[in-house]
Each structure stands twice: as structure tokens, then as C-alpha cells.
Image (tube, helix red, strand yellow):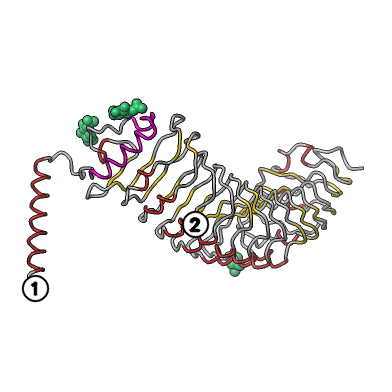
Amino acid sequence: MQVPTLKCSLISFTFTFLLVLLSLNPASSAAVCNTDDQKSLLEIKYHFNNASTFTTWDPNTDCCTNWSGIQCDAQGRVTMLANSIANDVVGEIPPAMGELPYLQFLAFSNLPQLSGTIPSFLSKLTNLQHLDLSLNNLTGPIPDFLSQLKDLDDIDLSSNSLTGSIPSSLSQLPKLRTINLGTNKLSGPIPPSLGSIKSLVQIYFYSNSLSGSIPSSLSRLHELNELALWDNKLTGTIPASFGSFRNPDISLDLSSNKLSGSIPRSFGKANITQLDISKNKFTGDASFLFSRDKTVLSSIVMSNNLFKFDFSNVDLPLGLKRMDISHNMIFGSLPKQLGQLPLYRFDVSFNQLCGKIPTGRRLKQFDAAKFSNNKCLCGLPLPPCN
Ligand SMILES: *[C@@H]1O[C@H](CO)[C@@H](O)[C@H](O)[C@H]1NC(C)=O
Ligand SMILES: *[C@@H]1O[C@H](CO)[C@@H](O)[C@H](O)[C@H]1NC(C)=O
Ligand SMILES: *[C@@H]1O[C@H](CO)[C@@H](O)[C@H](O)[C@H]1NC(C)=O
């Protein structure tokens, strides 16, 4: 029963002590670096032989106020570590990196000579919200233990040489908003369980060797605004469920995969701002991807597929800025509205189109190559129609 009073006097003692400390050093309101944290940081610096990025990490100055890339909380615990680009950071991530228990923001990136795997001692950083190990030379798998860091909202492991598959356990991260695993050597399927991370806004899995089909569960991500799956080995078609994306501003890049078959008609209902499905093996009709109702559609790229449909009566969205349907088997003529669109990138070459090219200020900026190799398109910039 004595405990509350004791606690109370302890708190007031600590408070007085803090006030004394502050009055001794009125110029600085920031906390003094915790000695354990400072020790860990110096171990990191010495591990990398005092590399240039750590020049300001001087043991005689305060890590919270004087060290670049370091931020602390009010108690002097290190909450942020961010480095600058450096070529002289050579070797693996040292165990001391796992000894910064209050770390929330870790950006140890742009270090082309940082090698080794993503070490398991990073699982001790249970307060981590932001993990950026991009643009290094890390190898090995994406560790399962990331799923234990429940506060993670941003993971960037892009541009390394990571192998293995994407762990489905990542779906246990309830706050994850952005995940970038682009430009690695990842293989295997995209885990359907990712569709249960309600908070996901951006998924970047581009330039890997991912295979299998695109999980239909991803359409359940109502916050999603960017899905970048380009340059993989994905097969199958676009899931029918993709017509039900809720976010009205979504950018979908599925280009350079092995997707095939016809596009499900339901996908035509999706409100997509930017769509790239180029360099696949899609067949059949895709005219329903265009429509005057698609007020948000500003860019559509479907080049290098096997699409075969009549373009004559396609109802073009009036906000279209970029349109590339080149290298398909699209026939019919170019719709008159084309001349009124705010186009700045455009290509209809290598199709089966015919008839007179519509006039219009915006269309005039594109040279003959963008209309070439069709069945019988004519008029400027091509030779006149007979
Ligand atoms: C790095 O700096 C520390 C402290 O100044 C020094 O003791 C150590 O020898 C240095 N290490 C290298 C490899 O220069
Ligand atoms: C450390 O930072 C404080 C606050 O910015 C500054 O007043 C002080 O001169 C710095 N000390 C050294 C040794 O750089
Ligand atoms: C797409 O946008 C239109 C117009 O804002 C809206 O009526 C429609 O419900 C939206 N579709 C979906 C699938 O959210």
C-alpha cells in the first residue's frame, strides 16, 4: 500500500532532476543520447571501418543533436537512422543494428557494397515502422520474421539480389501501406493472402521472376492505388474481380509478363487512371476498356499483344493523354474524336487499321511512324487517301 506514494515521489524527484538538467543546459531542449544507443551506433561505424557516411558520428558529440541521419525521442532513444549514399560501406549488416530497440525509421540504403542476407537480429526492432534496405547488394530470402514487426507500414527492399518467394506471412502486418520488392530475383507466386492487408496502398513487385496467376484477392484492397507487377513471368489473365477496385485513382501495370487469353468483360467496369497491359499475349476484344464514362482514364497502353477488334466505334474517354495500341491486330478506322483528345503520347502502328486519319491539333504532333504499318490508313502524316 506504500507503493503509490513511493511512485509519486519518484516521479516528482525525476521531474525535478530533469528540470535541473534542463536549466544547466538551457540552449538545448533535445534529450541527450542514450549511452546504449550511442554504443550501438559507434559499433556500426567501426564495423564499417569509419566509412564516409559516418563522419559526423563523433563519440565526443551528442548522437541526438550532432550526428547526421540520427533522430531521438524525448528520452534520448534513437528512433531514426538514415544514411547517405556511400561506396565505402563494405560488408554485412552488423548485429549492433539490432540493438537500437526504439528505432522506428531505418533507411540503410544506396550502399552498393552492402552484402549478405537480411539478418534475423533485425527482428528485435519491434518498433520499426519504416524499413528501407533498397539499392544495396543484399542476397538470400525475404525473411519470415518481418511479419513479427507489427508496426511496419513501409517496406522497401527493392534493387537488391534477393531470392526465394514472397512470404505469405507478410499478410500478418496489419498496418502495411507500401511494399516495394521490385528489381530482385524473387520467384514463385504472389501470395493471395496479401489481399487481406486492408491498409495496402502501393504494391511494387516489378522486375522479378514471379510466376503463377495474379491473385483475384488483390481486388479486395480498397485503398490500393498502385499495383506494379511488370516484368515478371505471370500467367493466366486479369482476374474477373479486378472490375471491382474501389479506389477511383488506381494505376495498374501488368506489362511484360506472360498473361494471355481474353480480358474479362467485368474488368471494363473498373475505374482505372493508368493501365499498362503491353507486352503480353492477350487476345480478343479490348474495346470495352475504352468508354466515355471512364472519366479518370488518362493512360492506356496495350501494345504488343494479340488483340483483334474493330476500333471504328470505340467510345474514347475525353481525358485520354496517352494511348498506345500498337503491334496488335486491331482493325476498322480511327474514331473522329481522336483529334479532340489531349494526347501527348500516341501510337497505333502495326495494326490492321484503315481509312482517313482524323484531323485535330493534338494529332498533328505525331509523326508518320506512329500510324505506320497498318492495312490502309491514309491522310496526313501518311500519304493522301485515294
Ligand atoms: C575508427 O575510428 C576509431 C575512433 O576514432 C578508431 O579507434 C579506429 O581505429 C578507426 N578504425 C579504422 C579502421 O580506421
Ligand atoms: C552540436 O549541435 C549543437 C546544436 O545544433 C551545436 O550548438 C553544437 O555546437 C554542436 N556541437 C558540435 C561539437 O558540433
Ligand atoms: C466508377 O466511377 C463511376 C463514376 O464515378 C461510379 O459510378 C462507379 O460506381 C465506379 N465503379 C466502381 C467499380 O467503383
The reply to whether the magenta stretch includes residue 347 is no
- From the top left corner, tell me how far across and down residue 195 is, in percent: 56, 65
Q: Which mark is residue 336?
A: none
Residue depicted at 77% across the width and 60% down the height? 261
Residue depicted at 54% across the width and 58% down the height? 167
- From the top left corner, tell me how far across and down residue 83 is, in percent: 39, 38
* Label 1 crowd bin: few (<14), some (14–19), many (20+), radius 10 Å: few
User: Hey, what amino acid is under mark 1?
Assistant: Met
User: Hey, what amino acid is under mark 2?
Assistant: Asp
The reply to whether the magenta stretch includes residue 40 is yes
Residue at disc 1, CB closer than 8 Å to ligand 2: no
**Residue 298 visible somewhere in the drawing:** no
For the magenta stretch, what is the residue range?
Answer: 35-55
Q: Which mark is residue 144?
A: 2
The residues tagged by marks 1 and 2 sit, at their Cα atoms, a distance apart of: 46 Å
Q: Nearer the viewer, residue 311 or 300?
A: 300
> Would you say 58 lies left or right of 256 here?
left
The disc, 1 or 2, on the residue closer to the chain's N-terminal end is 1
Helix, strand or loop status at disc 2: helix
Q: Is residue 46 above or below residue 378?
A: above
Q: Quadrant of residue 317?
A: bottom right
Helix, strand or loop status at disc 1: loop
**Residue 27 visible somewhere in the drawing:** yes
Disc 1 and disc 2 in contact, CB within 8 angstroms: no
State the quadrant of the C terminus: top right
Q: Residue furthest right?
A: 386
- From the top left corner, tell me how far across and down residue 336 is, in percent: 77, 52
Which secondary structure class fits the magenta region best?
Answer: helix
Which residue matches tag 1?
Answer: 1
Residue depicted at 18% across the width and 44% down the height? 29
> Would you say 347 lies left or right of 331 here?
left
